[in-house]
Image (cartoon, rainbow, N blue to C red):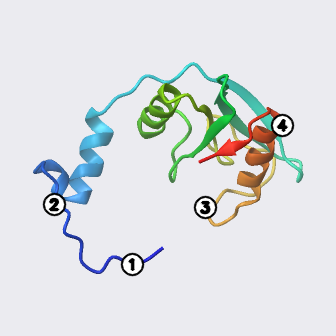
Amino acid sequence: MPIIEQSEYNSPSVIHRNRHVSTIYVALFKKFEVPEYTREKLELKDGDFINVDFIINDSKKAVILCHGLEGDSRRTYNNSCATYFQNKGFSIFAWNNRTCGGEMNRLPRLYHHGAVDDLDEVVQFALKKGLKKFI
C-alpha cells in the first residue's frame, strides 16, 4: 500500500477533522442494532476456540469482519458494516478474537492482529459453509 505523504481530503464536518474527537464522538453517539447473527464456537487446531457470528444469505459472496483492539463482533462499527454488506447481498462472518466476544479462552494465548492463523480458520469455516467469493 503506498504511503500518502500529503492528503488533500478535508472533512466536511468540524467534529471529524480531529481523529481523536472523531473516534470518541462516533463511539458515544453512533448506534447500530446488532444483526440477528447465528453464533458458533469454532474449535481451533491448537485446542482453543473462537466465537464466530454469521448470517448466510442466498448469495455465494461473503465478507469477513474483523474487530479492533478490545472490541468484539457486536460493536457499532461492525454492526454498521454488517448491515451495509447484508443489504448488498453478502453473507457476513463477524468473528471474535481470542478472549473477545464474552468468553475467556482455554489456553493462555491471547490475540494479536499480527497473527493470521485464527483468521485463516475463519476463512476455512466460511468456505465449509459454501461461500466462494470474499471481499
Callout 3 secondary element: loop
Which residue type does callout 4 highlight?
Answer: Lys
Q: Which residue lies most toward the top here?
A: 36
Residue 128, label in figure: 4
Residue shown at the point (69%, 48%) measured from the top left: 98
Q: CA distance from mark 4 to mark 2?
A: 43 Å
Disc number for residue 113: 3
Q: Nearer the viewer, mark 3 or mark 2?
A: 2
Query: Disc 2 marks which residue?
Result: 10
Q: Tell me the tag on residue 3.
A: 1
Comes first in the chain, label 4 or label 1: 1
Q: Of callouts 3 and 4, which one flags the residue occurring earlier in the amino acid sequence?
A: 3
User: Crowding near pointer 3: few (<14 within 10 Å), some, many (20+)?
Assistant: few
| Residue at position x 89%, y 48% in the image | 47
Q: Element under label 2?
A: loop
Picture layout, residue 17 above or below residue 81: below
Query: In this view of the protein, which residue sits in the foreground, 95 or 87?
Result: 87
Residue 56, horizontal then vertical, whole percent:
67, 25
Q: Are marks 4 and 1 in contact (CB under 8 Å)?
A: no
Q: Is residue 87 left or right of residue 52?
A: left
Numbered circles on residues, count:
4
Q: Amino acid at mark 2?
A: Asn
